[in-house]
Image (spheres, helix red, strand yellow):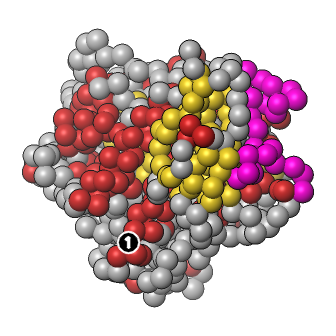
Amino acid sequence: MIRVRPGSPAALGAHWDGEGTNFALSSEHATAVELCLFEGPDDTRETVRVPIRERTGSAWHAYLPDVQPGQLYAFRVHGPWAPQQGHRFNPAKLLLDPYARAISGSIRWTDALLGYVAGHPEQDLVPDPRDSAGALPKSVVVEAAFTWADDRPPRTPWSDTVIYECHVKGMTMRHPDVPGPLRGTYLGLAADAVLKHLRSLGVTAVELLPICHFATERVLSDRGLVNYWGYNPIGFFAPDVRYATGRLGQQVTEFKTMVKRFHRFGLEVILDMVFNHTAEGNHLGPTICFRGVDNAGYYRLDPTNPRHYLDYTGCGNTLDVRRPQALRLMLDSLRYWAQEMHVDGFRFDLAPVLGRDPEGFNAQARFFEIVRQEPVLADVKLIAEPWDLGPNGYQLGGFPVGWAEWNGKYRDTVRSFWRGDAGQLPELATRLAGSADLFGATGRPPQASVNFITCHDGFTLTDLVSYERKHNESNGEENRDGNEHNLSRNWGVEGATDVLHILRIRDRMQRNFLAMLACSLGVPMLSHGDEIGRTQHGNNNAYCQDNPITWVDWHLTPARRDLLEFTRAALRVRAQTPLLRGRTYPGPESNPQPAELTWHRPDGEPMMPEDWGHTHAHALAMLLREGSDAILLALNAGGRSRPFVLPALAPAGRWRELLHTGQAEGDLSHGSVTVSPRSCVLLRFEGAG
């Protein structure tokens, strides 16, 4: 026997108050809900099943005075099995709590997880009677108390922000200065050696690949692979247990400890949130949480045939942000991570899904309006991946004020320019100057543009200059997966080589890309390990590789150490140069803003309209001025050295080199500099006084 009291519907999930635990589950269409308690080392023994009899609106709730932190639990939800009407209730299937603060482990794949009878002639129309408890991990009641003490979020201004996208496990699995038991964990990522490395780079924020509890797809598991990136969520409140050191429920405390240590080093923590779909897949996928709790309340169903899902994600389903239950889940999740876990921002995967009305993407959609008005989220950073797989899914520049966006046009343009493609100068100039064409019309500053060359998805920086074709054979899909449009160049040999002149140009090209990030208006983002030459050996879709292919190799050869020092120098120059961090778009000479921007030919003359049309031109200079301060970025993507005449500025002064990626020659005091092939130079003008 166990004591049961009515409890409260106010807070969904399981909440221990120091004496007992309140449980609340939202299901609009359920007819009955049962709370199941488990114990034992294998979490398969159901010891108590408690009918939840109290219902307030769509919330089912109960208070159990005898339940304490560490308790394993799950739900069984009763209701109609009517796939044609969008309902897939099956009480034989144990269900995770959508609001679970911790989950005990990984799914053990079996057909018992399917809500329907696999192989039946009518496919998913016949419910499966098998109990799935033995295959499903369990939700965990957690102790929320934590000593934050004097923790203060850095609140780094967007104009000073430098983002470092990284994977919790991949960053430390091969790090020699992280203690063995901590490698691959939240605590390992917060080790002094990692934090000091990030600080030495000039990074101000880490953007973590998804850490919300996720599932490895069955097709990957059957091939002996895992979902390494984590873009297959099943627990939007639960830090994944795979990155904890071991003890049940410890992942919450260890995640908080990580955030606290990052803040102590002045670093922000941004989470990659996957609110567009869940790990339950399409109508033939497993029943492990939302599908069994209230399929029609969480998912976007096909209005012409509710048996099927609308799929704007390529993952089989789409969470329906228009539905009250799904919308509340997302907003409660954001509040939880910001308020209880002290994270500093969010990057939203396939973000157009969040603004999809029946007519298409809407920048004034309800989700965006509520987030804008939510006090808890007022100071957090919001970043959109501005594309999904639905109709008109490319929405770069279309998000509301207050949002930044991954700028895919910046990535593609800079890659194209440095590999020598024709006709890139007009587009390149626009991207270097902050992409006002995308963000300026809606009143957003240059910092709305998150500029990146590489990210987790695609080639690493080293591979970008070493491979012209993807090499994804280890993924088990016969190299059919991954993007074919990489805008890469191998400079003579596909993959690794000992040919010295190829190694030199590859090194120079990596420096060019890093210099561009440092010298462009907007917010630069590095991908982890690019600063030390990380390679995935040509795999541009390493989502399923949890092994040395994706783990950062921290062994520093002389060449890798030089690249690291260059990255530090480039970001240090950015931090020390206010003109590169302007909060407004620079204006032309005829209509100057706080900063004045002009473009110049190598002969020092201003670019004229006809100059922009020279499709085979590969050299350009950007001059930024504000008062007596001025910088000049000279770019030469051509195959021969180019002399640049330096613009004459008043009052008198001299030019000084801040950064170069190749070999800069010439007498700056006489007004010229020669930029070697496929390289760039950054100069600062210093007044004579």
- Is residue 235 shown above or below 623? below
Horizontally, is 494 left or right of 392 in the view?
left
Q: How many marks?
A: 1
* Residue 55: % across, % down: 52, 30
Q: Is residue 61 visible?
A: no
Q: Main secondary structure of the magenta part?
A: loop
Q: Residues within 10 Å of mark 1 (few under 14, many from 20)?
A: some
Taking the spot 53% from the left edge, 74% from the top edge, the residue there is 489
Residue 637 at x, y percent in the picture: 61, 63
| Magenta highlight on residue 606 | yes
Report x, y in % for residue 444. Answer: 73, 31
Question: Which residue is drawn at the image coordinates 57% and 30% (left, top)?
Answer: 654
433 relative to 551, above or below: above
> Where is residue 530, by image quadrant?
bottom left
On-image quarter of the C terminus: top right
- Can you say whether 126 is above or below 364 in the image? below
Check disc 1 and report the residue beneath it. 503
Q: Which residues are magenta?
A: 582-610
Q: Residue at x 53, y 23 (%)?
A: 157
